[in-house]
Image: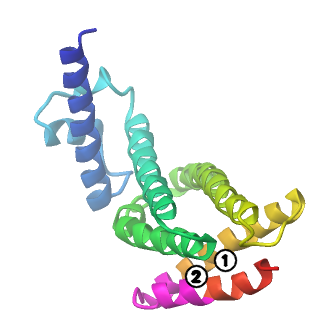
């Protein structure tokens, strides 16, 4: 395969996924068809099958892009920050900001699903959640280990560190849910700052 051909195929895939994302966000996963995606990019449905075998495969690819974008933004923010407290702050605030930006997309996905489809969708969400937790845990572990090595945090054995990561990530998800319920984005930064200050009291020597 030539570089030119590969570039054209990459561009086509990007078009397909961008169009599918827009449709999923407006109509929900259940109502969008392969025909809808094909029409959105001005192609026949058969053109899509060269790249993706089904709507579910397209959806999986769209979601993985969303996840990669979120984790990339968090990693970049953490790497740009200095010191473990600022890195934790960057981790938390970036996660909250990115989720707010992507909320409209994820909020519409299960619209129009029947009971069976909704059940399968919930199973897929659990798998996705576990994937995100693993990747966020790895980033958090790197952040905290670096802090311990630099003497910014007290030393912790592996089981304590693992428990700490679980508590930090669970707390972040709890803060996110509360902010969504209140529909209050203004509190995101103050809430993250307060939690990080509280956490740092127990993490220093």
Image coordinates for residue 12, horizontal then vertical, percent: 21, 30
Disc 1, SS? helix
Regarding residue 85, the answer to whether it shows in the image is yes
Residue at the outermost front position: 150
Q: Is residue 68 above or below residue 103?
A: above
The residue indicated by pointer 1 is 171
Residue 24 lies within the magenta run: no
**Residue 152 in picture, x, y percent from top left:** 71, 72
Which is the main secondary structure of the residues drawn in magenta? helix
Q: Give the colour scheme shown.
A: rainbow
Quarter location, residue 147: bottom right
Q: Which mark is residue 194?
A: none
Percent of width and height locating residue 59 = 40, 43
Q: Which residues are magenta?
A: 178-194
In the image, is residue 205 above or below residue 13?
below
Q: Is residue 191 magenta?
A: yes
Vertically, is 154 above or below 52? Answer: below
Displayed quadrant of residue 112:
bottom left
Residue, x 79% and y 83% (percent of image)? 202
Residue at point 67%, 57% (across, down): 137
Gap in angstroms between the C-alphas marked 1 and 2: 6 Å
Residue at the spot of label 2 = 175
Number of other residues with Cα within 10 Å of mark 1, as a class: few under 14, some 14 to 19, many 20 or more: some
Return the residue nearer the eye: 24 or 176: 176
Side of 189 where 146 appears, left or right: right
Callout 2: 10 Å neighbours few (<14), some, many (20+)?
Answer: some
Q: Residue at x 61, y 76 (%)?
A: 85
**Image quarter in which the C terminus is found:** bottom right
Give residue 116's position: percent from left, percent from top. Answer: 56, 51
Secondary structure under tag 2 reads helix
Give the position of the N terminus as an image quadrant: top left
Q: Are marks 1 and 2 in contact (CB under 8 Å)?
A: yes
């Amino acid at each position: 395969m030539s570089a030119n051909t590969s570039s054209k195929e990459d561009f086509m895939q990007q078009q397909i996924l961008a169009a599918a994302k827009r449709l999923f966000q407006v109509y929900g996963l259940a109502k969008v068809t392969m025909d809808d995606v094909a029409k959105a990019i001005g192609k026949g449905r058969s053109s899509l099958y060269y790249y993706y075998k089904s709507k579910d495969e397209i959806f999986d690819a769209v979601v993985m892009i969303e996840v990669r974008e979120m984790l990339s933004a968090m990693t970049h923010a953490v790497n740009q920050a200095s010191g473990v407290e600022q890195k934790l702050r960057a981790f938390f605030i970036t996660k909250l900001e990115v989720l707010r930006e992507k909320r409209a997309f994820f909020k519409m996905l299960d619209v129009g699903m029947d009971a069976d489809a909704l059940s399968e969708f919930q199973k897929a969400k659990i798998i996705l959640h576990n994937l995100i937790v693993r990747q966020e845990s790895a980033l958090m572990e790197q952040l905290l280990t670096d802090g311990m090595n630099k003497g910014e945090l007290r030393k912790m054995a592996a089981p304590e560190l693992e428990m700490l990561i679980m508590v930090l990530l669970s707390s972040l998800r709890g803060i996110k849910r509360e902010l969504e319920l209140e529909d209050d984005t203004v509190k995101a930064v103050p809430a993250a700052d307060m939690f990080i200050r509280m956490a740092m009291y127990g993490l220093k020597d």
